[in-house]
Amino acid sequence: MMGSKMNNKTYKIKKPRTILSAKEFFSQAFEHHTNWMLKIKKPVFPFFMQFYNKRRNEIEVIVVADCPYSPLEYAKPLIEKHDPDYYIVLSEAWVKQTNPKDYEELKNNYKYGDIKKSPDRKEILQVTGKSKDGKSNFGKTLVIIRNEKKEIIRFEDLIINNININNPKIQAEMRTDKLP
């Protein structure tokens, strides 16, 4: 997938005053990103990755847009290339609630972009963070609520089958094989 054309930019962020723990990095990155989304209110956001290098006390932000495939296809190679101590991936996506007995059939026949066409889909912000040593993880899945002008006005926890998806045990099980 890395050979496919994608539009991405890398930005360096002002160095933090002190070395960040994984928990501090994840929390600050998540809070900054969600506040930024509420402020900007754009109808469509690209895919963001933030990398933190403790030795250099440096944060890099990579913005990926105009991907011919799921942006997660690009995440693992970029994470491996930058080799951060911690990373966080923040991406808009679509999710659809399905009947558990229909899940396997839907999964086997799914093509990229199918959910976007579904009338009962929900727009979400999917956030996944991890430390290089694997000891620290962060995960959130929030429903994006927009007004009639398609501006983001708030986020809500994703609830599927009366289960809050932001339960830490469920988030741990949701890790994708596309991320190291």
Image (cartoon, rainbow, N blue to C red):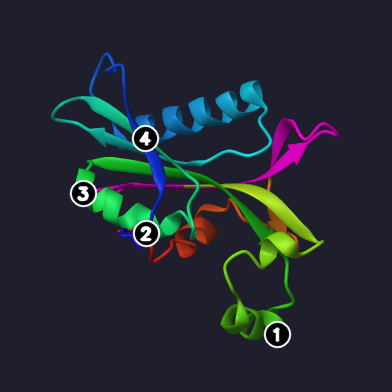
Q: Nearer the viewer, mark 1 or mark 4?
A: 4
Upstream in sequence: badge 1 or badge 4? 4
Q: CA gap, disc 3 to disc 1?
A: 40 Å
Kindly state the secondary structure of the residue where label 1 is placed: helix
Residue 131 appears at what percent x and percent y?
Answer: 28, 46
The reply, left or right, for residue 138 in relation to residue 119 is: left
The mark found on residue 81 in the picture is: 3
Image quarter of the C terminus: bottom left
Q: Nearer the viewer, mark 4 or mark 2?
A: 2
Q: Nearer the viewer, mark 2 or mark 3?
A: 2
Image quadrant assignment for residue 23: top left
Magenta residues, dominant SS class: strand
Residue at 69%, 60% in the rendered image: 116
Residues at marks 4 and 2, CA–CA distance in whole angstroms: 16 Å
Question: Secondary structure beneath disc 3?
Answer: helix
User: Where residue 148 sits: x, y (%)?
Assistant: 86, 34
Give the labeled residue for mark 4. 9
Residue bearing the label numbered 1: 101
Q: Are marks 1 and 4 in contact (CB under 8 Å)?
A: no
CA neighbours of label 2 inside 10 A, class few (<14), some (14 to 19), many (20+): few
Q: For the N terminus, give its image quadrant.
A: bottom left
| CB contact under 8 Å: marks 3 and 1 | no
Q: Identify which amino acid the numbered label 1 is placed on.
A: Lys
Q: Nearer the viewer, mark 1 or mark 2?
A: 2
Residue 4 is tagged as 2
Q: Give the percent coordinates (x, y) of residue 13.
A: 33, 21
Magenta-colored span: 128-156
Q: Residues within 10 Å of mark 3 (few under 14, many from 20)?
A: few
Query: What's under tag 2, amino acid-wise?
Result: Ser
Most extreme residue toward the left is 55
In which quarter of the view is residue 160 placed?
bottom right
